[in-house]
Image: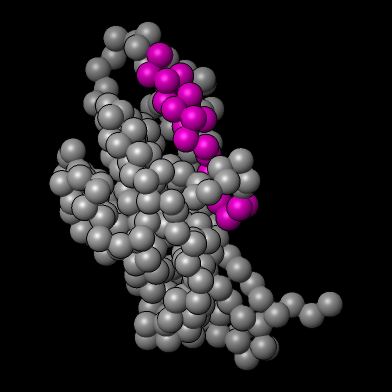
Amino acid sequence: SVTRLVACDIDGTLLDGSTAIAPAVFTQIRRLSRLGVYFCPASGRQYSSLRRLFAPVAGQLSCLCENGAVVFGPGDPGPILSKTEMAREQALALCRDILALPRCEVLISGANTSYLCPKQSDVVSLMRDFVGNNVALLSAPEETPEAIVKVSAYFFVIHNLLCMDRHIIHTIYGECVESHLHKIRQTVCHIFRQEPAVSTGISDQFLFVEVLSVVQSLLCRVAQHTVSVPL
């Protein structure tokens, strides 16, 4: 069979802690195009973030965004080819549950905007400056001005532990904490849109209840130590 499409994950695949795609990737994308093979970024990121990452070839690409909830076609910008919306009341109820959790932020995804109800400014900087999303701030989830395609939870405790050197984590907290952390490769833990039991295979994703279980385990482990580490 002849390969016609290459759909590729971004974080942890083409990106590994950096904020820029290597120039060699663009060279390969152009080479694939000459061979008649189409390249499609497939990510939990929003469209604007993917366009910034793939700026040299962005107009040539279709982008599978928000874990498949929104698909954009080629163009500058490209048209929306597909969009799957969450049931609004269920999405808002989930947002309220996430906001009720300590050290937890909610990220509400529209077609190409991340809506935040920030408890701390860190999450705004992360999504706007590091991830490169279009960001709008709300005082409550109910103010979201468009259809919701994805709801995500951001845990500060996980983010700050991930930012620590793995050797330090192992020394202070032990192998148990380190083994949990390697499972959570992104600081944003995505909530699957409609059928959370089905993995897209796009990247390492965990169900909300599983994430809460990991956080609880981490906190219990951390609580056993007297070393002062900012969470």
Residue 210 magenta-highlighted = yes
Is residue 183 among the parts visible in the rendering?
Answer: yes
| Region of the chain picked out in magenta, as a range | 200-220
**Relative height, residue 91 to residue 78 (above, below):** above
Position of the C terminus, as image quadrant, is top left
Rendered residue at 58%/76% (across/down) = 39
Main SS category, magenta section: helix
Figure quadrant of residue 98: top left
Residue toward you, 224 or 1: 1
Left/right of residue 227 with respect to residue 60 in the rendered view: left
Position of the N terminus, as image quadrant, is bottom right
Rendered residue at 48%/84% (across/down) = 74
Residue 118 location (% of width, % of height): 20, 43
Rendered residue at 49%/80% (across/down) = 73
Is residue 172 among the parts visible in the rendering?
Answer: no
Figure quadrant of residue 164: top left
Residue toward you, 150 or 52: 150
